[in-house]
Image: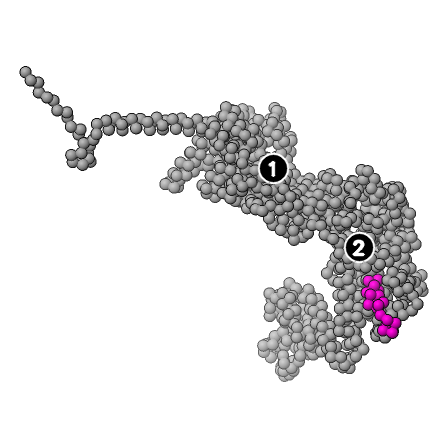
Amino acid sequence: MVEPQMEAAPNKGHAGDPPGYQRPPGFRLRWRVLLLVLLILGAVAALLLRREMQTSHWQARELHGYAATLNSHVAPGPADPIRFPTHGPFDERMGYTSLPAFTTRLQERGFEIAEQSRQDDALRTHLERGWFAPYAEKTHTGLTVFDCSRESLHAFRYPYRRFESFESVPAVVVQALLFIENRDLLDPERPQMNPAVDWLRFTRAVLAQLGSHIDPDIDAHGGSTLATQIEKYRHSPGGITHDAREKLRQMASASVRAYQQGTDTLPVRRQLVLDYLNTVPLSAAPRHGEVHGLGDGLWVWFGTDFDRAMAALSAPGDGAARGRVLRQAVALMIAHRRPSWYLAQGRQELDRATDAHLRLLTEAGIIDAAWRDAALRQKLVFRDMAKNPPLLPAAASKGTTAVRTRLAGLLGTSLYSLDRLDAQASTTLNGQLQDAVSTYLGRLTEPAFARSQELMGERLLQPDTLGEVRYSFTLLESTPQGNLVRVQTDTTQQPLDINEGSKLELGSTAKLRVLATYLELVAELHARLAPLEPAALKATEVSPQDSLSRWAVDYLSGPNDHGLSAMLEAAMDRRFSASAHEQFFTGGGLHSFNNFNKKDDARQPSLREAMQASINLPFVRLLREIVRHTMYQGPGDTARLLEDHLDPRRDTYLALFADREGQAFLRRFWRKTDNRTPTELSDMLLDGLRPGADRLTAVFRYLEPTASPEALGAFLSARLGDKAPEAPRVAQLYERFALDALDLPDRGYVARVHPLELWLVAYRRQHPRATLDEAIAASAAERQAVYRWLFRTRAKDAQDARIHTMLEVEAFLEIHRRWTRLGYPFGHLVPSLATALGSSGDRPAALAELMGIIVNGGVRRPTLRIADLRFAQGTPWETALRPTPTEGERVMAPEVAQALKKALSEVVEAGTARRLSGSFQSASGEDLSPGGKTGTGDNRVVVNRRGGVALNRTATFVFYLGPRHFGSVTAYVIGPDAAGYRFTSGLPVQILRSMAPVLMPHLDGRPGSGCPREP
């Protein structure tokens, strides 16, 4: 029997296969194997991902390796290229974002980059991607100011109150913070944990964000950790997260920063907790500024002492106190989410949120029920910012304040912002000597001490007014690098630095400036005339008014030593009358001057003698000689205008005078008419007139040019009552005083009012928003018209007086130029001979600079207070700057400087400062013989040509001590009571003499005296 042969069943195709297509044998098996492999790989990947999320092992290895390449180092000179931060509240406050602008400003003002950070390529690429630089960020820093020996003078640290270490933070504070913000951050079972990412919270946040796009009512929670929050409020623009990309940047930057020191991140995570508690931003408070950190937050917002608060949270004690502090601490942790709202308008909402969190903390086992209930019984009581403002710590010393003020000006920032910069400034100040001098001056209010220093007596101090006198002292040291400020202090206890920030009448110290100008002119005449042959010298044309040039010609024509030094000595021996009985035409009028000692009136002392005794009138006459010489030696020989009344240039000078005088009157009337309505302006002008129809009509027609005759009649009736003219008379007045019937000067003459006041009232009525500058520009023609009488030939005497006034003004412009070259600090001089006696004002520091020029033999060296600056130390943008070495500028002939120094030494040897003679003796044998100039100023506002109201009284001594040191000491009283003080410049001289034991260790360069001796 033959069995039938079986045929294999064909492979049936799947739906969609082409007709007739048969799958190869085993296809289904292979597909199932592939699916199984994918499932296994997915499971393995999920397990690895879960493990990575739990351990962060791979992140630790890779990110640590990456972070290790992000380096920088400091090298000499400027770096190119270098990338600085461009935003972020932390980077802005520390000054990192401003470093390019700071360095540019400093380089423009005499500094150069000494050192700067070099960023490795990897770090620079990291920054170019927009990520934040990983480095050990500073949480408690600010401006540090060092003295010349690198001892700290000023160390501002912000925030003010902080936890010193993680261990010093009470456990309940750490637990509460982590419960609210980042619960698993300190898990010790995950040593390599990435603190920047909480994967569970991050996933929930992503899903919530996606859901919020579908349903806006879904609450989209954030996924921030403490690490990303710190990145946000430090480095993100505005301290906020603008979008998802910014959040990813925070996470990436925080991840790299976490692994920079190694793969074990537990120490880093503890530091994150500490940094957050110390730096979390908590809005800003009035009269305090920004608030950062829990410590400052407790004190600023609640007035709670930080140390007591931490003690209450660390150990059992007063239940109410513990509850109150806990409530405040939790409230501030919540307030960080919206500090400007919660700590201002949202305080009630903050109270309710705090209650809820206290209950949650109890449920979590962080606090017990008793502590919770004690906290719930409390309410948040905020500090009364008006009655009890959170004032900043006391200001620094005067020397440091002067340095900080100068540095703030160099950087273009405020003192508030300056103190918060990550910066160090080394100064030239001698800290030990600064403190010693400040202490000495502060003790002068003690009667017993002042008496022991021989400061009591006539023309010195009086026991009952010791506390009202203020003192300032400056000491500088001349070195090849510049004049280094060693001491700068005063006793005002105010931010204003009297040495540099004031304008005082310092009396006879101005005679030193006048004498310097005089000797410079003598030196210039010597340079011009000495080389001339005798015949040419005798033929030199000199105006009779230029007595200085005449004396120079006569001296060089005689049998004298023609050397410059000899001529300067002869110039000092010239004699000038000390008579007080002459009136001087100066400043546009006649003035009289007096000597301090009336016995000097009959003398005719030499300039040397007048300098020693500080006699006024010889220096007034000397300045007059300087002014006349300047007038006749000026360009164009303009002083000849006074001798030739046909010179066409006279009209030009008269026009200048008219314009100058007109502007002076206009400014005066502007102040008088300021802040008034148009009606008030008219009433003010009319009320000052003597009633009369002519006068009133002249004014009315000018102010109301389009008014009708009826309006004029009504106006006169209101002003004159029964004495008002009838209608026919009104019509005549209306025509007679029409706008084109009289010019402005004639109208002012009729009304008996200054024409420019009348013009200004009309102008301000028509242009109520106009400025003074606009009024001056609009009144150019009127100012000339008011002084038209001056141009008439019959007024030659009046013309000469006005031309002389303008020539004097021009002469003082030239004198001011000379003074400015020698350190005069103000923009103009009073064009009057009273400037010889101090009426133009001065500053102690500026006088000290002039003394430095003399000590340095006529060379003006820069005054240095800042020896070097260092910003952002230990960061990838560290930058150090120092003053650019510069050579001094010769501004005075050495022979002139020597002649002045000799005259100043004679003031001490035989003049007004003779009590100082022999006071400074060096143990090393160095010559410390002093010299100087005294001055007493009595500044008053004259009222009705009488004594007037006293503004201040000053007594100053500007000095040098030996070949290297110089400075100034000033005593002063400010206010109306200054009229009752009689001290003179003998007071600062005696103060300097009594301070010799304090100053000598520094002057003598003894070991431990403070500053290292400059080469």
Give the left or right position of residue 442, taking residue 309 as reference.
right
Query: Dominant secondary structure of the magenta stretch?
Result: helix
Badge 2 element: helix
Quadrant location of the C terminus? Answer: top right
Q: Residue 138 got which mark?
A: 1
**Residue 442, image quadrant:** top right
Q: Residue furthest left?
A: 1
Position in image of residue 446 (x %, y %): 84, 42
Q: Which residues are magenta?
A: 519-538
**In this figure, which colouring scheme has been used for the structure?**
one colour
Give the left or right position of residue 19, taking residue 63 as reference.
left
Quadrant location of the N terminus? Answer: top left
Q: Nearer the viewer, mark 1 or mark 2?
A: 2
CA separation in Å, label 1 and label 2: 44 Å
Q: Residue 660 got which mark?
A: none
Position in image of residue 255 (x %, y %): 50, 34
Residue 224 sits inside the magenta stretch: no
Q: Are marks 1 and 2 in contact (CB under 8 Å)?
A: no
Q: Which residue is mark 2?
A: 853
